[in-house]
Image: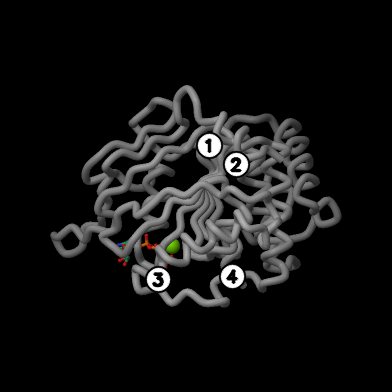
Amino acid sequence: MLDTREKQGLRCGYPLLSVENVKLGYRVNGHTNVAVGNAGFQVWPGEKVMLLGPSGCGKSTLLKAVAGFLEPEDGVISFAGRQDLRPGPDRAVVFQEFDQLFPWRTVLENVAYPLRATGRSRDEASEKARRFVELTGLSHAVDRYPHQLSGGMKQRVAIARALALEPRMLLMDEPFGSLDAQTRARLQKELNEVTRRTEVTVLFVTHSIQEALVLGDRVVVLGHAPSEVREVLEVTGAAGDLDSKRFAWTRRQLCNLLAEDGEEVDDAVFE
Ligand SMILES: Nc1ncnc2c1ncn2[C@@H]1O[C@H](COP(=O)(O)OP(=O)(O)OP(=O)(O)O)[C@@H](O)[C@H]1O
Ligand SMILES: [Mg+2]
């Protein structure tokens, strides 16, 4: 696990993702409803950056724009030096919903499908899919169909499928939001392990302070819609050591920021 100084050392050279003065909205009945008023932050290769903020503040909207599903009304998003952000396998997305798998395909076929769709041969796709299914602890379930899996297993398959594409950035939109607290904690731990082994860069949406602290190197805190970036905080404690003084300081900062925005911040947030 990298310590804070090493993580800061990652932030030299060029960022992988740069979001500058970005405004995002949706056209509804001829008007643009602005969701994100002005967002700016960077993500360097190998970092795990968390987007944290109240419900409806535009976290998913920002993620969709980075994925290339939505164009900014204003400002610039550049990824690996490019600004024409069409959706592509260099930014794989994992969503919150359990139904993001093809119900008629097995675990292995679900993971192999995007590999085939992006030009890998049948054998190569199958071999790679097997490797990533193993990495996410699902070797025993390769031949099962989604209806034969628990919620946590389905999310592991979705993560394996995204990682198998070997994306430059993994975009995750509350992937553990629908899981019970115990399963969520286990998957958070597993994700830390998998991202350490694959060294993939992660942009992760959450509304949980606990999750931001357990998974993130830095936390981008958004205010209410039309949102702006309130603060970008470094997570300074050692991963997993939620009781350390340094973690407590970051946690207090995050609580204060959310409370200033009228969010109810209590123990429930920490789950
Ligand atoms: N497809 C859409 N069309 C119109 N408005 C939308 C659309 N998707 C989202 N919005 C609006 O944009 C705003 C931001 O939504 P978004 O889903 O990004 O919030 P969020 O921070 O991800 O919230 P949550 O934590 O509840 O998931 C909200 O006001 C929402 O109603
Ligand atoms: Mg959302």
Badge 1 crowding class, 10 Å Cα cut-off, few under 14, some 14 to 19, many 20 or more, is many
Q: Quadrant of residue 196?
A: top right
Marks 4 and 2, the one that precedes in the sequence: 2
Marks 1 and 2, the one that precedes in the sequence: 1
Give the residue at mark 4.
270
Q: Are marks 1 and 4 in contact (CB under 8 Å)?
A: no
Marks 4 and 3, the one that precedes in the sequence: 3
Instruction: Specify the amino acid type for callout 3.
Output: Ala
Instruction: Specify the amino acid type for callout 4.
Output: Phe
Looking at the image, can residue 116 be seen?
no
Give the residue at mark 3.
259
Q: Quadrant of ligand 2?
A: bottom left
Whole-Å distance between the Cαs marked 1 and 3?
37 Å
Residue 123, percent from left and from top: 76, 32
Residue placed most toward the observer, 30 or 117? 30
Instruction: Specify the amino acid type for callout 1.
Output: Pro
Instruction: Specify the amino acid type for callout 2.
Output: Pro
In the visual, does 174 lie left or right of 157?
left
